[in-house]
């Protein structure tokens, strides 16, 4: 018996390669950018020149100048009277917070 011979046809496919055209990037319009910058500067100068600032400073010197002295006043914190804020701070800063009342803790933290 004779063997059947089959012919296989090989199809060749050709891939079409297409070259994409690169878009030519336009250069920035330097004249347009320059005009925008110049216009912005003109507006900036125009609006800045319309601002008025009136500042008055007076300094008194010599015999007419008065000095105010700060008078230490007694301060009461949690029912305890201290001669001044500094004296209260000197006494309270060495106590641990567990022994201080809330009012004393707030005073020490705010000083």
Image (spheres, rainbow, N blue to C red):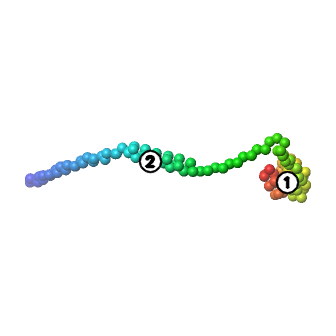
- For the point 82% across and 44% down, which residue is it? 65
Q: Answer with left or right where residue 70 lies relative to residue 26.
A: right
- For the point 82% across and 57% down, which residue is it? 103
Q: Answer with left or right where residue 30 lies relative to residue 110.
A: left
Q: Residue furthest left?
A: 1
- Of 43 and 50, nearer the camera is 50
- Of 28 and 41, nearer the camera is 41
So how many labels did they put on this image?
Answer: 2
User: How far across and down, in percent of the image, does residue 47 sit?
Assistant: 54, 50
Q: Answer with left or right where residue 20 lies relative to residue 79.
A: left
- Of 68 and 87, nearer the camera is 68
- For the point 46% across and 45% down, which residue is it? 38
**Nearer the viewer's eye, disc 1 or disc 2?**
2
User: How far across and down, in percent of the image, does residue 111 sit?
Assistant: 80, 50
Q: Answer with left or right where residue 58 lies relative to residue 13.
A: right
- Of 30 and 1, nearer the camera is 30
Q: Are marks 1 and 2 in contact (CB under 8 Å)?
A: no
Residue 20 sits above or below residue 77 on the image: above
* Location of mark 2 (residue): 36
Separation of marks 1 and 2 at Cα, in angstroms? 69 Å
Q: Residues within 10 Å of mark 1 (few under 14, many from 20)?
A: few
User: How far across and down, in percent of the image, does residue 88 sit?
Assistant: 87, 50
Which circle marks residue 99 in the picture? 1
Q: Residue furthest top?
A: 62
């Amino acid at each position: 018996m004779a063997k059947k011979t089959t012919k296989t046809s090989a199809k060749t496919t050709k891939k079409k390669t297409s070259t994409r055209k690169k878009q030519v990037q336009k250069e920035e319009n330097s004249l347009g950018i320059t005009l925008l910058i110049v216009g912005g500067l003109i507006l900036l100068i125009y609006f800045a020149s319309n601002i008025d600032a009136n500042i008055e400073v007076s300094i008194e010197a010599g015999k007419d100048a008065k000095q105010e002295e700060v008078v230490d006043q007694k301060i009461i914190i949690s029912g305890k009277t201290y001669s001044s804020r500094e004296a209260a701070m000197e006494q309270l800063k060495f106590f641990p917070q567990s022994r201080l009342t809330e009012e004393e803790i707030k005073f020490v933290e705010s000083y």
